[in-house]
């Protein structure tokens, strides 16, 4: 896994501007890894589904 801190900051700012609050660094790292590897994310937490509306994040089953 490659951590791109600038990308994490961009993702966090995007989420905050869209009203998605409370997304922590661990969840951003999970999302970034899924995006980098072009893998769908299997997650039950609602904020991942919200993030997928504004980030190139694919949610399994959606």
Image (cartoon, rainbow, N blue to C red):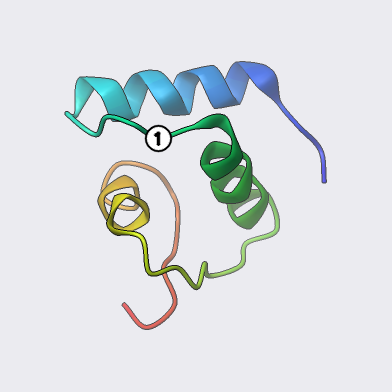
Q: Residue at x 54, y 38 (%)?
A: 28
> Residue reaching furthest right?
1
For disc 1, the marked residue is 23
Query: Image height check: is 59 above or below 7?
Result: below
Mark 1 closeness class: few <14, some 14–19, many ≥20 residues within 10 Å = some
Q: In which quarter of the image is the C terminus?
A: bottom left
Under circle 1, the secondary element is: loop
Front residue of 44 and 10: 44
Q: Residue at x 71, y 26 (%)?
A: 4
Image label count = 1
Query: Image height check: is 52 above or below 42?
Result: above
Q: Which residue is drawn at 52% across and 18% down?
A: 9
Query: Image height check: is 3 above or below 38?
Result: above
Left or right of 8? Residue 62 is left
Query: Image height check: is 14 above or below 20?
Result: above
State the image coordinates of residue 22 (x, y, percent, origin top left): 34, 31
State the image coordinates of residue 61 (x, y, percent, origin top left): 37, 83
Left or right of 37? Residue 9 is left
Left or right of 53? Residue 45 is right
State the image coordinates of residue 7 (x, y, percent, origin top left): 58, 24
Q: Where on the picture, by quarter, is residue 55?
A: top left
Left or right of 29? Residue 49 is left
> Residue reaching furthest left?
19
State the image coordinates of residue 11 (x, y, percent, origin top left): 45, 28
Q: Which residue is drawn at 45% across and 54% down?
A: 57
């Amino acid at each position: 896994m490659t951590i791109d801190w600038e990308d994490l900051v961009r993702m966090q700012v995007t989420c905050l501007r869209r009203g998605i609050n409370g997304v922590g660094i661990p969840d951003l790292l999970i999302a970034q890894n899924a995006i980098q590897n072009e893998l769908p994310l299997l997650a039950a937490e609602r904020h991942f589904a919200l993030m997928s509306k504004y980030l190139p994040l694919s949610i399994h089953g959606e």
